[in-house]
Image (spheres, rainbow, N blue to C red):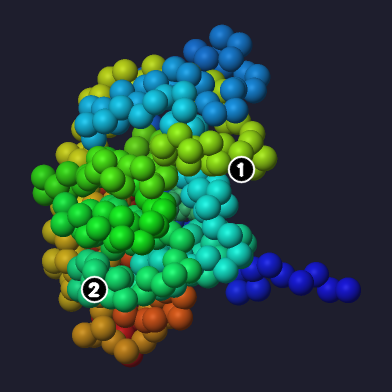
Amino acid sequence: MPLSSKLPHVGTTIFTTMSRMAQEENAINLAQGFPSFGSDSVLLELVAKYTGGGFNQYAPMSGVSELKQALAVKTQLTQGYFPDPELEVTIVSGATESLFAAFTAIVHPGDEVIVFEPAYDSYVPAITLNGGIPVFVPLQSPNFSVDWELVASKISSHTRAIVVNSPHNPSGYVWSQEDVNFLAHLVAQHGLYVISDEVYEHILFDGKSHISLGSNALLRERTFICGSFGKTFHVTGWKIGYCIAPQPLSYEFRKVHQFLTFSTVTPIQYALAEYLQNPEKYQSLPTFYQKKRDLFLEGLALTPLKFQPSQGSFFQLVSYGHLSKKSDILIAEQMTRQLKVACIPVSVFYSDRKDLQVLRFCFAKEDKELNEALNQIKNFDKILD
Ligand code: PMP
Ligand code: GLN
């Protein structure tokens, strides 16, 4: 009997594919979203301190108390409320686990879940593996904002939840207070749950601030906030993240977490707890990344490509539809093989592979790499029809 796939339409992720192609072609990898620079030596020394100090056995299932407490304090400082560290904060193995556990905790077979597109690739498989049905709502070009009337029109008696991601991957769109208020209204009206992917919570530009859904008292009661230390502290390979949710939601979330991974890497939890005592470490991120975004945009302005400045995250979308009718997948491949700069075709973030002729570039890279990549992108006309 052949194995009947539970994910028949899923192959290798585009991030793996493009990183592999970048390596084969010796191209600069502006495709997969990870920093090319190292993390703070202070954090690395703290990890050495705790591994050397014997903190190497299983952590408590919901996380080390010191880290849960530090996250609650950070939430108070940045979002104005204090989640109960022992009941409402859970440490997990990356935001990917946080998202999967949150979907699994609430999605029953036949439940509909509203997903904005373009969408990060892990949401839909997590919904369908739980028997749920994704209901897609396109974000509006050119800035990828939310059409709230359209969202309201997609809600049915089967709608269980909605997935939110601000700052948004891949577009960089950042939710306004108005967006949060619209969502709160719909959640109250229809009794929805919310899964809020806030992994880029500390990477925002032009003075914008991140409005966590937890900062809204009504939404806080219905929302799983999923975060990642990988993004904030330039350590994506550590796969450590968290979920903040009210006690009844966290209770169900933890039931899933304890059978997904049970607990998360112990010494790194202690190290992060100590490192978080200095808020400057995450408060300095907007300035740090804004320099990179601006460097990248200044270079792009010298090319024939078009763009709207990213508002947050470490991604920049770029459109070429006025120059060529080639598919974004073909252009991304040619960029990698011929121009030696890898990027991500945005059509892969759409369930129907809608091609807006837009590419995603990650600018979390050394300035030298960004400058080299820009030099290459200037030759974009070489890959036109
Ligand atoms: N959500 C978004 C929007 C992301 O870009 C990523 C990227 N890595 C994740 C979740 C997963 O985070 P982690 O690596 O902590 O699992
Ligand atoms: N979040 C990263 C991105 O969007 C990739 C993470 C992964 O490779 N799964 O590029």
Residue 347 percent location from the top left of the image: 40, 75
Residue 107 percent location from the top left of the image: 54, 57
Q: Amino acid at mark 1?
A: Val
**Residue at the (40%, 66%) spot, across then down:** 115
Q: Please name whichever residue, 190 or 1, is drawn nearer the observer in this view of the structure.
A: 190
Q: Disc 1 on helix, strand or loop?
A: helix
**Residue at the (28%, 20%) spot, across then down:** 278
User: Which residue corresponds to mark 1?
Assistant: 256
Q: Is mark 2 within 8 Å of ligand 1?
A: no
**Residue at the (53%, 52%) spot, across then down:** 106
Mark 2 residue crowding within 10 angstroms, few (<14) / some (14–19) / many (20+):
few
- Looking at the image, which residue sits at the far left? 207
From the image, state whether disc 1 or disc 2 is nearer to you. 2
310 over 219 or under it: above or below: below
Residue 227's tag is none
Q: Is mark 1 within 8 Å of ligand 1?
A: no
Q: Is residue 295 left or right of residue 157?
A: left
Q: Is residue 246 left or right of residue 287?
A: right
User: Which residue corresponds to mark 2?
Assistant: 149
Point out the image quarter for the C terminus: bottom left
Specify the quadrant of the image occupied by residue 93.
top right
Mark 1 residue crowding within 10 angstroms, few (<14) / some (14–19) / many (20+):
many
Specify the quadrant of the image occupied by residue 148.
bottom left
**Residue at the (51%, 21%) spot, across then down:** 64
Point out the image quarter for the N terminus: bottom right
Q: Amino acid at mark 2?
A: Glu
Residue 340 percent location from the top left of the image: 39, 65
Ligand 2 quadrant in view: bottom left
Q: Is residue 199 visible?
A: no
203 over 4 or under it: above or below: above
Specify the quadrant of the image occupied by residue 255.
top right
Q: Please name whichever residue, 350 or 320, is drawn nearer the observer in this view of the structure.
A: 350
